[in-house]
Amino acid sequence: MIRAFFDPFLWFDMLCPPILNKGDKVALVAPGGAVDEIKIRFAKEVIIGKGFEPVCGDHLLGRSNYFSGTDEERASDLQKALDDPEIKAVFMARGGYGITRIIDRLDFTAFLRNPKWLCGFSDITALLNHHPEVVSVHGPMPTTFSKDRNSTDQLFDFLMGKDLDYTVRENRYNKKGSVIAPLVGGNLTLVCHCLGSASEIDMDGKILFVEEIGEALYAIDRLMVQLKRAGKLANLAGIIVGQFSAVRDSQIPFGKDAYGIIRSHVEEYGYPCLFGFPAGHDTENLPLPISGLVSLDVRESENSRVSACFGNGI
């Protein structure tokens, strides 16, 4: 039996941006770290090949120490993309660090009046979840378009109105169950970083997605403890665990791998847990709709399924 963890009457208040049509303009902005010009050149070719017109932010290829520009410059580029009615989607060029330095400078009035797709992952987690009433996309960014063609194709297919339907290989850490609920989350560090801020994520009744890169096992445990102590794990509808890439142990072994750590912190709860979803910092990074309604069907000894219909009709 599939449980539904949402109020269907409240769900109609959700804003799903319109599908992309051939010829639409899409923006490329760099709200965080500086970007590689060669990767941007490739991304523009991909976008043009899909039938869209790329519009580059003024400081897309800029540099201010670590960042692609000063806080003012990066915020200005993103603000212009949010406000321009001709821009139908905004692709964040890369993650790294920087979005939370500028997010409180942004005015989302025009964006909320005429929502458009915000696309990215990693550091961009904070932006994707900042206005949960608008569906956004956790998925490939322009600087990662070249890593996996299938993930990039799936991203554009979804933006053009195609449903998402994934079969996920069995994993020994899975906890079976089925649920339909809105999806939230992204990078685990950013999910925790947003606690206590205007970007804190409401996780009650939601499916939480998490992925991570480059963290020590004890640090992953600490992040999960933080979520638990903040009351964020007890009332989830489910959890989807993506890639935990380049994870390292300390000199004295922690005793559990990343998935084992996460499973131990959600063990006491009855909701379904899916491990090994192919999204994050590895080669494959399948798109997921943040704030979109997702159907999660987890099996323990066979393949599981994750699906989402465009416009959220499950």
Image: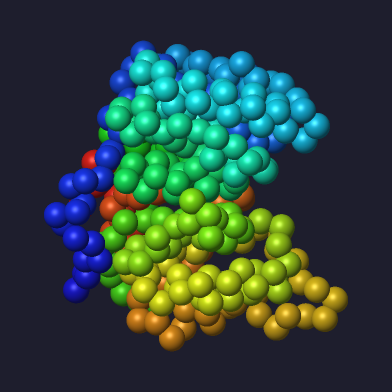
Q: Is residue 261 left or right of residue 139?
A: right
Quarter of the view holding residue 302: bottom left
Q: Residue at x 67, y 43 (%)?
A: 97
Residue 149 in sight in this render: no
User: Of all residues shown, which one is farthest toward the left?
Assistant: 9
301 vs 203: above or below: below
User: Of all residues shown, which one is farthest toward the bottom?
Assistant: 268
Q: Residue at x 47, y 79 (%)?
A: 266
192 vs 218: above or below: above
Residue 163 or residue 77, whichever sits in front: 77
x and y percentages locating residue 117 in the rendered image: 39, 33
x and y percentages locating residue 20 in the rendered image: 33, 25
Quarter of the view holding residue 94: top right
Residue 20 in sight in this render: yes
Q: Residue at x 59, y 57 (%)?
A: 193
72 vs 167: above or below: above
Residue 57 or residue 289, whichever sits in front: 57
Residue 167 or residue 15, whichever sits in front: 15
Q: Is residue 87 left or right of residue 8?
A: right
x and y percentages locating residue 237 in the rendered image: 33, 69
- Name the quadrant of the N terminus: bottom left
